[in-house]
Image (cartoon, grey):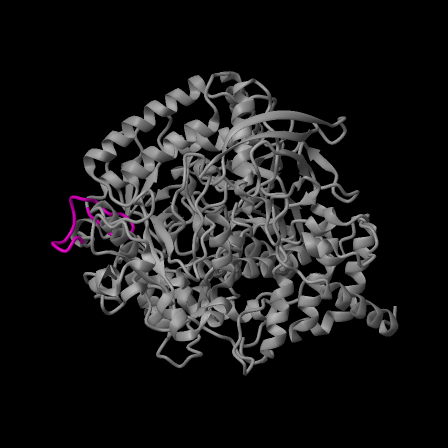
């Protein structure tokens, strides 16, 4: 795959001072009159924080919403697994937080590769999100006076993270799900669980519906509407092992890409520093231990490379608290990309712990000595419990072993300031878009972004689209739907027809190895070229050797899985291409050729201070790399420092 | 780490309206470090190699929070461990030579879709009947304007931790959903935000629960024992109190 010439994209960022852009834009956007809203149909794909909040909010406004999800219930979307918390610039602790500071921290945390105007808006609406969630009955942690509690997260020097034990994502999602089910009850949302979107239907250049497979009956169904919202999450499972749920996939985004939506910054993937290490070849997923643990846990390895003592027998003077050593200002609370690379550096240098040598210690000894076991249990009880379940070790007495794992993907479909993709009428929200986190997301910001997009941005910008674009009546009888249905059916039959000798899972594991080894925590031009070659040949192998039993006319989980893997096998190559073309290191994208003398990521602002957005040009053609220049008017571009 | 050789008796049912049966499989070399679902993954790889369709089972997050996984394991919902979902159950809990019987949730309100997969959408419909605060986006006051006593907030959180897996229903001899409904009613009854709709909520949710075919509660507490999220039986007591209060005071 080579790269075709670049052209520039317009993000439609409103003019004026950054503080006034959103307010000004809200006034300039067109409205749909209250009694006209019921004439418009909107499809929302996915029911995570972004999807559920958008579907509920649009229905509350009066639009007719169709909501699809792949799980058996909308309450199970992967947002539910977020543990630590949600950021908001409330400044309740009076410790110096503000919209400007949250904005600044997020831009800096993203290594200056996000769009300023979007991030500022995110910080502006962050407070309203907390208000909305509390009003829904989300049981956030509280102080004894009855007011909301906060804690600190990586990349920040203020306490702005709201949390509900270690289950913040679950509680926020159940709040949004409640609002969604309320609209289902009112008849304003038609809910279709166990549906997988297989195509976006574009009529006269505008997104007018989707085609989805009913996962129970196998039927390919058509849904027509005036606008389509993709809230379909990230693509971390391209690595096979990740902290994502097993069902997370790139299919919806990839189909949109193939219909004309540009894919932005696919190489920006987040490797989370605190996950339970891999224990064997059968491993099906990795489990995150919330970043909040770094508030009280200290990360260390032995100073000796050939250490054989048990952790408790290693005296203080023989321990290397390498994060505190390297980054005295932030210590254990450096951003995720920095902490992950530092762990990898120690393990690669031979200081790793545990049977595999691919782990470092996260130790609560000092915190327990200081605060007592009860206080630590109150804060992290469910996380310690989970750790013990999985490893059969007691973290109250033995330090946790942790290692980085793929967790979140900052890249996604390109969207403008309105969260609209390059296909008019196709909006992309939450992790599925690329806009707010740059090259590295800060902890507790994913929940904030998903809900900001769904509650406070899309309800306005989707209305603007409906009010300003002429949308003639389109039904599912339109030839574009018929064509998409035939495509989807053919694809299912093609997979079933291979009848080879390799299981879907074995091929996915192999893809995961390639991605992790060459496109993981550190990347090189040579390795990336190698990876692209290997992905291409694995893709060919898939279409010659994959073995999927059963039929397409029933619940067939292996068939679903094969379809998702087929898309990952195409997408993986784009990820590697993007990584190869970005000749700099920034955030989660670390190119070995571009590092400072102290092995920190070295950006190239002169040549790469832009978003790379990829356009699909057909099965055998190279994609076009478009750019959106990033201009920093408010935050000064500097070398990120957490020292 | 050691390895187990197991005999699995797994419920196989091609479709909702098809006849089901137990099939017996031998599975050797199971690592004790595996989760229960990873063991089923290995079984499915073996079945695919032998040209038999893999066993369908629901699962997603595999970290105990999404509530998608289920399974009756040797007659116990989510298997033998306390406060543990099937995905967090590990094979070190079993012994070499064990026979493990694996069934889907059994309840009238949860029809079998295929093999071990059931349809739990009845739980969504119960929530739709009132398991929320009716607040439109944009109309909320400042989050700290209404203090909530910490002990109430903590109790509400205990109840809100329900993952909606349906183990309580599966474990109950009457397939009652009282623990599930009690958890949601309690969460809202404990918080000031839930007060305005308190009466209608409990009446509507209980009516919907009955209409969906869930059975009655006899306080046997099997539900509490099976619950992976440690939802307490006291939530059923609170549900009963809320319900009586609502019946006596409701104008309907």
* Location of the N terminus of chain A (image quadrant): top left
- Residue occupying image coordinates x 88% and y 73%: B248
Question: Can see residue A414?
Answer: no
Picture layout, residue A595 above or below residue A219: below
Query: Closest to the observer: B133 or B32?
Result: B32
Question: Can see residue A69?
Answer: yes
Looking at the image, the residue that sits furthest to the left is A597
Please state if A553 lies on the left or on the right of A210 as rendered.
right
Q: Residue A428 at x, y = what percent?
A: 46, 49
Q: Residue A412 at x, y = what percent?
A: 39, 46
- Residue occupying image coordinates x 45% and y 40%: A253
- Residue occupying image coordinates x 32% and y 70%: A17
Q: Residue B186 at x, y = what percent?
A: 70, 67
Please state if B128 lies on the left or on the right of A304 as rendered.
right
- Residue occupying image coordinates x 43% and y 37%: A254
Picture layout, residue A281 above or below residue B218: above
Q: In which quadrant of the rendered view does residue A565 lie?
A: top left
Q: Residue A429 at x, y = what percent?
A: 47, 52
Looking at the image, the residue that sits furthest to the bottom is A145
Residue A249: say if magenta: no
Total marks placed: 0
* Location of the C terminus of chain A (image quadrant): bottom left
By secondary structure, the bulk of the magenta-drawn segment is best described as loop
Query: Closest to the observer: A294 or A411?
Result: A294
Residue A590: say if magenta: yes
The segment highlighted magenta reads A584-599
Q: In which quadrant of the rendered view does residue A24 lie?
A: bottom left
Picture layout, residue A96 above or below residue B204: below
Query: Closest to the observer: B232 or A609?
Result: B232
Please state if A393 lies on the left or on the right of B221 as rendered.
left
């Amino acid at each position: 795959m080579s790269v075709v010439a670049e052209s520039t994209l317009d993000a439609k960022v409103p003019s004026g001072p950054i503080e006034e852009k959103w307010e000004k834009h809200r006034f300039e956007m067109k409205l749909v009159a209250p009694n006209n809203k019921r004439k418009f149909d909107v499809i929302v794909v996915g029911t995570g924080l972004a999807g559920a909040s958008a579907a509920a909010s649009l229905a509350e406004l009066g639009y007719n919403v169709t909501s699809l999800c792949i799980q058996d219930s909308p309450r199970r979307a992967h947002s539910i697994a977020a543990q630590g918390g949600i950021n908001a610039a409330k400044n309740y602790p009076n410790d110096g937080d503000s919209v400007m500071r949250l904005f600044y921290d997020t831009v800096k945390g993203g290594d200056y590769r996000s769009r300023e105007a979007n991030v500022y808006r995110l910080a502006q609406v962050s407070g309203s999100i907390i208000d909305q969630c509390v009003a829904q009955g989300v049981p956030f942690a509280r102080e004894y006076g009855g007011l909301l509690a906060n804690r600190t997260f990586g990349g920040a020097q203020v306490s702005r993270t709201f949390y509900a034990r270690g289950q913040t994502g679950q509680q926020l999602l159940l709040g949004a799900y409640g609002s969604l089910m309320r609209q289902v009850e009112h008849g304003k949302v038609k809910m279709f669980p166990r549906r997988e979107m297989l195509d976006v239907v574009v009529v006269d250049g505008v997104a007018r519906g989707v085609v989805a497979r009913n996962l129970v009956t196998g039927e390919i169904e058509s849904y027509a509407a005036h606008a389509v919202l993709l809230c379909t999450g990230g693509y971390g499972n391209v690595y096979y092992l990740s902290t994502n749920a097993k069902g997370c996939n790139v299919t919806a985004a990839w189909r949109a890409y193939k219909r004309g939506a540009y894919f932005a910054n696919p190489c920006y993937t987040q490797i989370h520093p605190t996950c339970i290490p891999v224990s064997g070849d059968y491993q099906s997923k990795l489990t995150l231990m919330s970043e909040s643990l770094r508030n009280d846990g200290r990360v260390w390895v032995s100073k000796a490379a050939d250490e054989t003592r048990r952790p408790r027998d290693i005296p203080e003077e023989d321990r290397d608290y390498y994060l505190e050593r390297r980054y005295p200002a932030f210590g254990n609370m450096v951003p995720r990309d920095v902490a992950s690379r530092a762990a990898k550096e120690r393990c690669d240098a031979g200081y790793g712990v545990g049977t595999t040598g691919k782990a470092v210690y996260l130790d609560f000894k000092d915190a327990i000595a200081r605060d007592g076991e009860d206080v630590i249990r109150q804060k992290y009880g469910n996380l310690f419990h989970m750790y013990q379940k999985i490893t059969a070790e007691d973290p109250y007495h033995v330090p946790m072993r942790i290692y980085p794992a793929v967790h979140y993907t900052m890249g996604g479909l390109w969207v403008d300031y309105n969260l609209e993709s390059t296909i008019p009428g196709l909006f992309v929200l939450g992790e599925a878009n690329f806009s707010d986190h740059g090259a590295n997301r800060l902890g507790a910001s994913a929940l904030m972004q998903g809900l900001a997009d769904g509650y406070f941005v899309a309800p306005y910008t989707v209305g603007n689209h409906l009010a300003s674009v002429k949308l003639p009546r389109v039904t599912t009888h339109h030839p574009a739907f018929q064509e998409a249905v035939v495509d989807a059916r053919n694809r299912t039959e093609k997979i079933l027809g291979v009848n080879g000798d390799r299981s879907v899972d074995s091929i996915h594991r192999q893809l995961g190895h390639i991605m992790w080894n060459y496109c993981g925590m550190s990347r090189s031009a040579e390795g990336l070229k190698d990876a692209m070659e290997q992905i291409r040949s694995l893709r060919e192998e898939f279409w010659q050797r994959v073995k999927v039993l059963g039929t397409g006319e029933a619940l067939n989980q292996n068939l679903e899985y094969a379809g998702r893997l087929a898309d990952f096998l195409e997408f993986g190559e784009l990820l590697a291409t993007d990584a190869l073309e970005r000749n700099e290191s920034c955030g989660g994208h670390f190119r070995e050729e571009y590092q400072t003398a102290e092995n920190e990521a070295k950006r190239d602002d002169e040549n790469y201070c832009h978003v790379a957005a990829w356009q699909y040009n057909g099965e055998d053609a190279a994609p076009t790399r478009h750019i959106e220049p990033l201009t920093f008017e408010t935050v000064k571009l500097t070398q990120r420092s957490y020292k | 780490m050691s390895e187990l050789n197991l005999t699995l008796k797994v419920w196989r049912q091609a479709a909702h309206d098809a006849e089901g049966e137990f099939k017996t499989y031998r599975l050797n070399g199971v690592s004790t470090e595996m989760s229960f679902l990873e063991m089923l993954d290995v079984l499915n790889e073996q079945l695919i190699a032998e040209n038999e369709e893999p066993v369908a089972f629901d699962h997603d997050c595999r970290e105990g929070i999404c509530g998608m996984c289920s399974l009756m394991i040797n007659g116990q919902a989510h298997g033998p461990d306390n406060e543990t979902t099937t995905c967090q159950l590990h094979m070190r809990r079993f012994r070499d030579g064990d026979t493990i019987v694996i069934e889907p949730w059994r309840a009238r309100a949860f029809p079998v879709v295929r093999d071990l997969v059931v349809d739990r959408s009845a739980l969504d419909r119960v929530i739709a009947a009132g398991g929320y605060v009716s607040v439109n986006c944009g109309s909320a006051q400042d989050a700290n304007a209404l203090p909530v006593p910490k002990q109430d907030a903590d109790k509400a959180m205990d109840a809100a931790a329900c993952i909606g897996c349906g183990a309580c229903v599966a474990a109950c001899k009457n397939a009652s959903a009282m623990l599930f409904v009690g958890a949601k009613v309690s969460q809202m009854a404990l918080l000031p935000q839930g007060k305005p709709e308190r009466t209608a909520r409990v009446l509507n949710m209980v009516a919907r629960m009955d209409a969906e075919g869930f059975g009655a509660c006899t306080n046997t507490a099997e539900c509490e024992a099976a619950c992976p999220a440690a939802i307490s039986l006291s939530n059923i007591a609170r549900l009963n109190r809320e319900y009586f209060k609502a019946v006596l005071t409701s104008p309907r």
